[in-house]
Amino acid sequence: MTLAVVAEGLRFPAPYLACAVVVGAGIGLNLLLTFTPLGRRSGADWEPAAQLGFDVLQLAAMLYFTGGLANPFALLIVAPVILGSASLPSRFAAGLALLAIAATLTLAVWSMPLPWSDGDPPSLPVIYRAGLAVALVAGIVFAAAYAHQAATEAAQMELALNVTETVLAREQRMSALGALAAAAAHELGTPLATIAVVAKEMARETPEGPVHDDAMLLMAQAQRCRDILRRLAETPETGDQVHERMSLLQFVSEVVRPYVGEEAVRVEAVVTGAPGVETPNIWRWPEVVHAMTSIVENAFDFARKEILVTARFDAESVQVEVRDDGPGFSPAVLAKLGEPYVTSRPGAEGSRTGHIGMGLGFFIAKTLLERTGAVVEFRNGRPGGAIVSARWPRSRIEAPATA
């Protein structure tokens, strides 16, 4: 359409036949991809990179025949680079950007005159043409880097949210087992009652002997089953005290258990409280145990010699703190720590396990802890080391004493 306007509307002379050949090549490629099996399958990464590379070369050829960088449409050479940077792996995106830069620099030196109507077309000074080239190259680099970073962070955020949803779904399934057990107890109650009645009748009508003894045993076992189902049907408030509640010492001990006995790092758990305040028992929340264990795992990666897990309580709150003696959090990421695409610690390649993460562990742990009402804080200690703490209102996490 642009060529038609320039040729028929403005009446500018230009090599329109050569331009038509370039346009025809693009039409041919589009028809090939649309009406053949090539366009109806999932291709490898190099195929869309090659197609975008063709777009760059096609536009470069059009610009060569119509004035090079003096053509106002030269800015469009950035478009395929942005698309490739947002959708292709890094090596293909970088190759596409280099191709566009090479085409830009070539057009800054060699091109046919700009189409013009009256007399000779305007001749741009060399320094201005060089400035156009530098501006386009800078635009290509900036746009490619920005598009690639935005696409990468969006993908990492989506991955982090999917992982978090998976963890939460698993914890919810575990919580749903209680409701399932209650439903099973309700359904099995009636047949067990029938078995107990029939066994009682058999025992009453059968004289002493093996059959009578079997009937009595059947009655006893049916009653045992009913007792078990009654306990399963109880609500969490009247449930198993051993598994529903735990002391603070049990909690911190469970969190550090995987690393107790490690020779490289000494891991210690401590419970301390305000004078005169009774030590609380807390709810055994799987998400809290999972989150704090993940934080201790990260501390173990970077600690030099020691990790200290401290549970503190007073009349108003309960706080759990994980402190290590490693290099601490980098100032560059400390303010954004807890976001899924931020590397959690500096020098991850030097960690004890060699793990290089994107901060997903901290993101998931922070999400799980905040879901239970905790306020999570990341900071560096003095003289060094990292500190991660979670503080709950005591009324939120404390399990009330049973009668």
Image (cartoon, rainbow, N blue to C red):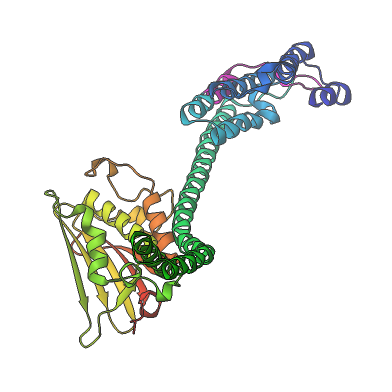
Magenta segment range? Answer: 99-120
Up the image or down, 89 lies above or below 385; here it is above
Give the side of residue 25 with respect to residue 262, left or right. right
- The answer to whether 5 appears left or right of 323 in the picture is right
Residue 188 place in picture, x, y as percent: 50, 62
Q: Is residue 338 visible?
A: no
Direction from residue 238 to residue 77 in the image, left or right: right
Which residue in the rendered view is the most extreme toward the right? 8
Residue at 30 percent across and 72 percent down: it is: 319
Does residue 41 sit above or below 205 in this rendering? Answer: above
Name the quarter where the N terminus is drawn: top right
Is 43 left, or right, of 375 in this rendering? right
Q: Residue furthest front?
A: 207
What is the x, y in percent for residue 351? 24, 44
Q: Is residue 171 visible?
A: yes
Q: Residue at x 72, y 14 (%)?
A: 25
Residue at the left extreme, as displayed: 263
Decide which of 124, 345 is in the foreground and name it.
345
Image quadrant where one finds the C terminus: bottom left
Residue appearing at x 24%, y 67% in the figure: 250
Magenta span includes 330: no
Magenta-span inclusion, residue 110: yes
Report the residue at 26% width, 72% height from top.
247
> Residue 169 placed where, x, y %?
49, 54
